[in-house]
Amino acid sequence: MHLLKGIIKSLKLILSDIRSAIVAWAVGLLLASFGVGILYLYITAKDATIAIMTTPTPLWLTTLLVLACCAYISLKFRQLYLSHNTPNKTPSENSKILYRVIGNYKWKVEIYPSGHFKVDHLPFCAKHDKKFIFKDGKSCPDHDCKNNISTYDDYRVKAAAESDIEKELRNNDISAFTKY
Ligand SMILES: [Zn+2]
């Protein structure tokens, strides 16, 4: 009885040893095949890269690439040019342009949706409806017209006009304004 128990115990030990050995082998085999796979992938990728780099580029592809670069650069320059030249030069889309005659001058007024306004620095001649030019201060370009603003009076005349316009706009009284 004692002997039988001893044999069974020994057999169990041997079996468990064999099982451990099989597991170890399986794991080892798996790792080895994984490693070989990685190595194979690496070699394939390297070969492909070398093949691409050593193949001469066709002329049409080179031309196409150069043209694409030129198109891209010119597009960027155009965008840069436009972004530097458009802002604040034209009236904003929602602003309103009206004209207001005060004395001998007709002022162009740009009114923004916020309620702010801007009076153009060059008025029009109220009589000839022509925009002033810079001549002996600011003058009507009409030959026989003496309508002008001297350099000395420039600031005062415009500030007085702005004061009148501000009062009228603030009181929502635009009856004296014209569209043209
Ligand atoms: Zn005039």
Image: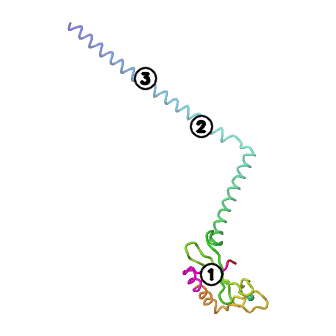
Query: Quadrant of the image for the N terminus?
Result: top left
Per the rendering, the mark at residue 46 is 2
Residue 12 position by quadrant: top left
The image position of residue 135, as x and y in percent, is 73, 88
Residue 55 position by quadrant: top right
Q: Is residue 28 above or below residue 105?
A: above
At horizontal 68% and vertical 77% (from top left) the residue drawn is 179
Q: Which of marks 3 and 2 is nearer the N terminus?
A: 3
- The one nearer the camera, 120 or 68, is 120
Residue 32, magenta (yes or no)? no
Q: In this view, does 26 lie above or below 179?
A: above
Residue segment shown in magenta: 163-178
Residue receiving disc 3: 26
Name the kind of residue labelled 3 in the image.
Ala
Give me the C-alpha separation between circle 1 and circle 3: 98 Å
At horizontal 59% and vertical 37% (from top left) the residue drawn is 46
Neighbor class of circle 2 (other Cα within 10 Å; few <14, some 14-19, many 20+) is: few
Per the rendering, the mark at residue 164 is none
Give me the C-alpha separation between circle 2 and circle 1: 82 Å
Labels 3 and 2 touching (C-beta < 8 A): no
Per the rendering, the mark at residue 175 is 1
- The one nearer the camera, 163 or 72, is 163
The image position of residue 180, as x and y in percent, is 70, 78
Ligand 1 lies under 8 Å from the Cβ of mark 3: no
At horizontal 73% and vertical 87% (from top left) the residue drawn is 127
The image position of residue 138, as x and y in percent, is 69, 88
Q: Which of marks 2 and 1 is nearer the N terminus?
A: 2
